[in-house]
Amino acid sequence: MCSIIGYKGKNSAAPILVDSLKKMEYRGYDSVGVATIDDGSILVRKGIGKVIEVNKSLNISEMAGKIGIGHTRWATHGGVTDSNAHPHSACNKNIAVVHNGIIENYKELKAELTAKGHVFSSETDTEVIAHLLEINISGGIRKAMIDTCKSLKGNFAFVAVFQDGTIAGARYEEPLIIGVANDGYFISSDVLGFLQYTDKAIFLENGDICIVDSSKLEIFDFEGSPVAHPITQVAWELGDIDKGKYAHHTLKEINDQKQTVVHAGRQDEVMMQKFCDILGNAKSIYITGSGTSYHSALLFKHMLARFGKIRAETVMSSEAEYALSSMEADSILVAISQSGETADVLDSVKLAKSQGAKILSILNVTTSSLARSSDAFLSTNCGPEIGVAATKSFTGQLALIYNVTDRLCNGCLGTSKAEFAIAVENVLANVASIAKAAEKMNGATDIYLLGRSLHYPVALEGALKLKELAYVHAEGIAAGELKHGPLALMEKNTIVIMLNPHDDTFSDTISNAHEIKARGATVIGISDSKDDVYDHWIEIPRLNQSAFYPLVEVIPLQILAYQLALANSVDPDYPRNLAKSVTVR
Ligand code: AGP
């Protein structure tokens, strides 16, 4: 959940590194640091804050040198302090390291190194890597990298810079990608770190080490045997992360949905058929994901059951270790993930594979580890999502789920890209009414969201958006469960959002709204039909196919969470304590 970048080339390293870190800041944003080599010495500047702020205060982009490494941090071991910010150096200051992941045996290693006289200047697990490299360097950089990697337990991707101008990287269970430019090399956590300079990438695999030494690239494994990987051409559009006329990426991404729900329908026919064939013929199906992607998994399960007459189980990826232990060998695991790098999701894939299951995935980043571990994958095609809150990736996942279900039920849904686009555009045009609802909710400390059937996962998703963007306690509740307990919470000033379009859940949910209203709570209805029970009505368009309502009813919830974030002085793109890709367990 940190971003790492290394550069060695013909240009000034620091401005390139700062630029790259800005593009990858979504991965972690509590502190920043860069090390460059100038005149045979390693210079380090680092501090807490966002890239723009730290660069401004420390003039990082003016650091001299054509070789360097950089990092943005999401703290795991050690508080958010200047000294815990990366890069970390060893005692002689002749090596500096940036790292993403967790070194599980760092305490033992630190004790051994301390006993040998090494002095540590941070509380991080990362610093052991710098000291190990320093100890192992006597046999040369190649051997130092191999010996150091062999000593580490846990998951890591790191890049080190050495005083002689060499940069080297290693990968185990965390992504690391080499960018091959005409005038230099990059070693990065994400293609976004170098895509503005080159579209040629080499994806390292687990157990790979790379060294860029006097502009030659060498890749080998932890045993020292050479490794060959192809150079992949990455689509330039993946680098399109400009927020344009919008104040925040999150707002742009919410508005992008009128196009992205259409783009999700653009699938490679062969891949789509393969995906549906595997799914349609599966004996047992498990669907997994984390956070928002798990909510899509819940919707997928409903859709498959109701329209495809296919039974599937859903498993939160963080629970997969316990829930998937008895998978049948011929099962299918469908993994849903925007980033394709979420550690919990990748772990569940690994576990399922080890039990003989096939992997299908729905993802947004087609160059991700998940894409490379899947038997077939479909892309939501919604372009880079930078805001920490998933918005367009959720509706992209839903649009894809509708498409797949439609195939599996021989066109019973009648999915229409045009209908999706018009419906989403209509909701987005309704911002004024959503703003009024946000005013009613401003200052609330607890918000409840109720829905039945397909609307229940949307209630969970809306609650997640309110928690992470507005820092408000919010809870999604299956409306029928109200009488089994949550009704006790309803009183004057309680805010309840009812997800209640005109489908087979409508009248039961209206009854719930009356029960809530009778206890004095404020009821906000998101529906295609007005009702007196609502204190405030957010209108959504009427749809021909009622199964598509989740796609449109989630948008007012995203906008509400965004508006409440602004009202609560939260930067919606970078909420506290979170990172976009959760690559640690
Ligand atoms: C959603 O708004 C969150 N930021 C988070 O729950 C996210 O959906 C989750 O971490 C899964 O990410 P993924 O889809 O990239 O796997």
Image (cartoon, rainbow, N blue to C red):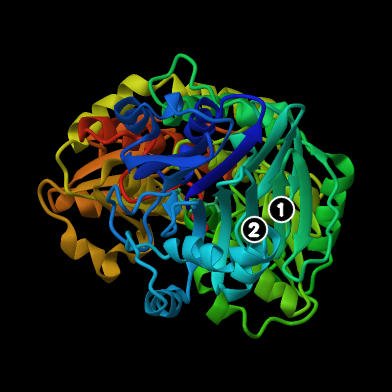
Q: Position of residue 554 (x, y in %)?
A: 45, 40
Residue 210 numbered tag: 1
Task: Residue 365: name its quadrant.
Answer: top right
Q: Position of residue 152 (x, y in %)?
A: 56, 72
Disc 1 within 8 angstroms of ligand 1 (CB):
no
Q: Is residue 139 shown above or below 194?
A: below
Q: Position of residue 497 (x, y in %)?
A: 30, 44
Residue at image mark 2: 170
Query: Callout 2: few (<14), some (14-19), or many (20+) C-alpha neighbours within 10 Å?
Result: many
Name the residue at 60% across, 52% down. Answer: 337
**Pointer 1 or 2: first along the chain:** 2
Q: Position of residue 513 (x, y in %)?
A: 28, 49
The amino acid at mark 2 is Ala
Side of 485 where 20 appears, left or right: right
Element under label 1?
Answer: strand
The amino acid at mark 1 is Cys
Residue 382 visible somewhere in the drawing = no
Query: Could you say which is closer to the camera, residue 578 or residue 112?
Result: 112
Farthest residue, direction top: 245
